[in-house]
Image (tube, rainbow, N blue to C red):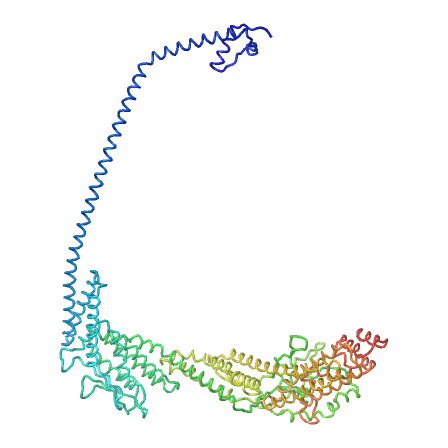
Amino acid sequence: MTDVDNTALAPAILTHLQSGAYPSSPSLSSAPLTSDTLPSIISSLRTEQETLKTSIRQLSRNAAPDIDTWITRARDLQADILRSRETAREIVREAERLKELREGAEERGRKVRLLEAEVGFSERLGEGLRGFGKVNQGVGVVREHVLAGRLTDAVEGLETVEAGVEDLGNTGFEGTRAFGVLQERVRAAREDLVERVSENWGQLVVAEPGEGDKSRLTVRKQLGNQPDIKLEGVLDAAERLGLAEQYAKRLTTNIDRTMLRPLLSKGRYGESGKITVSSTTPDALECTPDSQVIDTASILGSMKALLSHLRSRLPHQSGIQHSATFMPMLISRLEEHWLEPSVPLDMSRTDEFEVTLTELLSFADFIDSLQWYGVDQVRQWVEGAPRAWLTKRRETLLGDVRNLVFSGSQERKIVERVETEMVGKDDAFATSGNGGDDDWDSAWEEPSEGSSERTDVAPASAAAPSRAPIEDDEASAWDTDDLDDKPDETGEEAWGWGDGDDANKPPSPIATRAAPVQTNGIAPAQPQQREVTLRESYTTTAVPSALLSQIQVVIKDAQTLFGPEYAESPIAPAAQGLYTLPTLALAIYRATAPTAYAKIPVGNMLIYNDATCLSASLLAWQVNTPRSSRLRLEADTNALETFAKRAYTAELDAQRTILRDLLDGAQGFADCTVQPNKAECESAVQQVVDRMHEVHALWKPILAPSALLQSLGSLLSSIIGKITLEVEELADIAEADSKQLRLLCDRISSLKSLFVASEGATDMTFIYCPPWLKFQYLGEILESSLADIRYMWSEGELSLEFEGEEVVELIEALFAESDLRRRAIGEIRRGR
C-alpha cells in the first residue's frame, strides 16, 4: 500500500463527519491511521472547530434582535395568562352568586304555585259543591216529576242530572264518598223512573190470555183517569232510557200469547180463533173461537185486524221499530202453524193452495202499506212455495218409506215369477227337468278354496259337463241309471212348465242359444221352436209392492204437473223435482232395510228377494210408461240389484264362515282313525251336514227353487272344496285312514238329497255344485287300487276332474314306494 499524504486524510475525515460520505479514492479509504498522522488530523479538526464557532457567533449576533422580540412577546403572554386566571375566578364567584339567586327564585315560584293551586282548588271545590247541590236538587225534581207522572220532564231531568254527575266525575270528585252517595241517589231516581214507565206500560198495554175461551189484548193511547200519561210518551221515555228493545219483546210476547197462539191453534172442538175489536172496549182486541170453516183468508183477515189495530195505536216511528221484533215472530208462527200444514200432498187440493198464495201476496201488500218489516219474508215464502211443496212431499215420502220398511218387513207374500222362452222341440231344455231360471243369480261368484277369486255359480239350466260314456258298473256307482230310464219325471210337472201367455218377453240371456254354424256353405235345418214358460214362487215382504205403489203415485203426480192444465200452477216448477223422489225413497229403503231385517233369521235373503222383486217391478213399470216420460230408473234398479247381491253375498259368506269353522274342528283330517281325532272329525262332518239341512229348512220357504239350489250348491262347493284341499295336503294316508276318510266323504255326499226334488227324481247335485263329481272321484280314489286309479285316469273321466299332479300327490300319500307306483305316476304325468 502506498503512503497517503496526511494533508489529504484530514479533509476526507472532515467530509465524512459532516456528510457521512466516504472518500472516492480507494487509497484514502484503505489508508492506515498511525500515530504520525493523528496530530495533523487533530490539528485540522481543531481548525475546523474554530471556524464553526466563529460562524455560529456571527449568526448569533445577526439574530439577536429577533430573539429579543420573542422574549418580549413571551412575557406579554404570561401577563395575559395571569389576567385570564383572575377573570375566571371572578366568573366562578359570579356563577355561585347567580345559583343562589336562582334557588331563591325557584323557592318563591313554588310558593306562588302552591298558592295558585290552593286558590284553584278552592274555586273547584266551590263549583263542585254548587254542582253537588244542583245535581242533588235535580234528583229531587226528577222524583217529583216521576210522582206526578210527568215522564217526559222526568226523563229530561234525569238526563241533565246524569250529565252533571259525569261532569263531576271529570273534575276529580269521582273517588269521593260524596260522589258515591250522589251516584246512588241518581241510580235510585233512574230505577224509580224505569219502574214508573213500566207501570204505565202495563196500564196502557194489557194482555189477558185465556180467560175461558177468549183472550184479550188492550192497547190504549192514554190512560182515561190520567190523560197526561200517553202511550207515545211512555214509548219515548222507554226509547230515551234504552228500554225500547225490551218493551218491543214484551209487546211481541203479549201478541203471541193473547192473539197468535189462540188464532192458529186448534181449540178443544177443533176450531181455530178469530181476532176482532171488542164491542165494549174499542182499545181491546179479542181472539175468540170460531166454529165456522177457517181458511187462509179468515186467518190473514184476523192478522190484518191485529196489525191495523196496532198501527192505529202505536206512534208511526215506534210502530216501525217494534215491527222489526214482532213481525218476524208473527210470520214464523203463521208459517209453522198454518202455511206449512196447508201445503197439500194431494193434487186435488192445489187450487186451494193457489188461493192461499194469492191471499199471502195480498197480505204482503198490506204490510208494505204499513211500512213495517216482514214484507220480504212473506214474499220469499210465496216464491219458495214450489220448494216447500216439494220438501213436504219428500219428507212425507221418506217418512212413509221408513215406517213401511219396519212394519212391512214383518209381513210375508208369495210372489210368482214367470219367464217365457222359445226353445227347440228336441232341446233337452224343453224335455228334461234340467231347465231352470237361467239368469237367476247368474252374476254370483263362488270363491274357490285357496284362492281369493270367485267362479260363476252354475245356472239351474246349465247342462252337465261333457264326459266320456260311463261304463255300466261305474254308472251304477254314480246313481245315474235313471237318467235314461225316467226322463219324464223331471219334466213339465216338476218345474211348472206350461203354455205361457207372455210370449213377447225377451228370453233369458244365459238361455239364449247360439246361431247354428254353416258347414260348407249350407246352413243346417232350423229346429222347430216351441214356447215354454217357467213359473217359480218365492217369498217377499210387503215392502216391494207398497213401495212401488208409493213411487207410482209420486211419478203420476209429476206427470200431471207437466200437463197443460197445471202450466200456470205455482207448484208446477216442482214437477221436475218429483222425479228425484223415487231415488231418495229407494236410498232410504237401502239404508234402513239392513236394520229392519236384522232381527229376522233369513233377513238377508228377504232383502235379496225384495230388492230383486222391486227392481224387476220398476223396470217393467218403466217399460210401460210413455217414451216422453222423464222417468229414468236404470241407475236405481242397478243400485237395487247391487244391494240385493250384497245381501245375498253377505248371507252366503256368513254361512260359509260357519261351515268352515265347523270343518276346522276336524284338524285337517290328520290321524282320523286315532282318538280323539276320529271323534272330532266325525263330529265336524256331522255338524256340517246338520247345518246344511238347517240352512235348507230356513231358505226353502223364502227362495225360489232354482235360487235355493244354487245357494245350497254354492255352500256345498265351499265345503267339498275345503275337504278336498285338506285331503290332498295329507302327506301320508294309511289304509285305515283312507277308509275312514271315505266314510266321512259319504256323509258329505248324503247332502245330495237336498238337490233331489222328489223320490226317484234325477240327482241334480253336479249341476249346482261344479266340484261335486271331483269329490265323488276323491272318494273312489281313497278306496281304489293303483290299477283302478290308472284305469279311471286313462279310460274313465278322472282326468276331466283332477289335474295330473293332484292324482300323483294322492297316489304318493296312499301307496308306499314301489315299482308299480313309479310306473303309475309316470303314466299319469305323461298324460296317458
Foreground: 333 or 159? 159
Give the mark count. Answer: 0
Residue 794, quarter of picture: bottom right
Is 184 positioned to the left or the right of 665 in the image? left
Is 795 positioned to the left or the right of 136 in the image? right
Task: Residue 291 in the image: state x and y as whole percent.
Answer: 28, 92
Is 643 positioned to the left or the right of 789 in the image? left
Task: Residue 45 in the image: state x and y as whole percent.
Answer: 47, 9
Q: Residue at x 28, y 21 (%)?
A: 75
Foreground: 233 or 407? 233
Foreground: 392 or 815? 815
Residue 655, quarter of picture: bottom right
Task: Residue 238 in the image: state x and y as whole percent.
Answer: 21, 74
Q: From this view, report whether residue 5 is shown above or below residue 129.
A: above
Task: Residue 409 in the image: state x and y as whole percent.
Answer: 52, 88
Residue 560, quarter of picture: bottom left
Q: In this view, which residue lies farthest toward the right? A: 819
Foreground: 598 or 436? 598
Q: Looking at the figure, which quarter contains the C terminus?
A: bottom right
Is 580 positioned to the left or the right of 484 in the image? left
Q: Looking at the figure, which quarter contains the N terminus?
A: top right
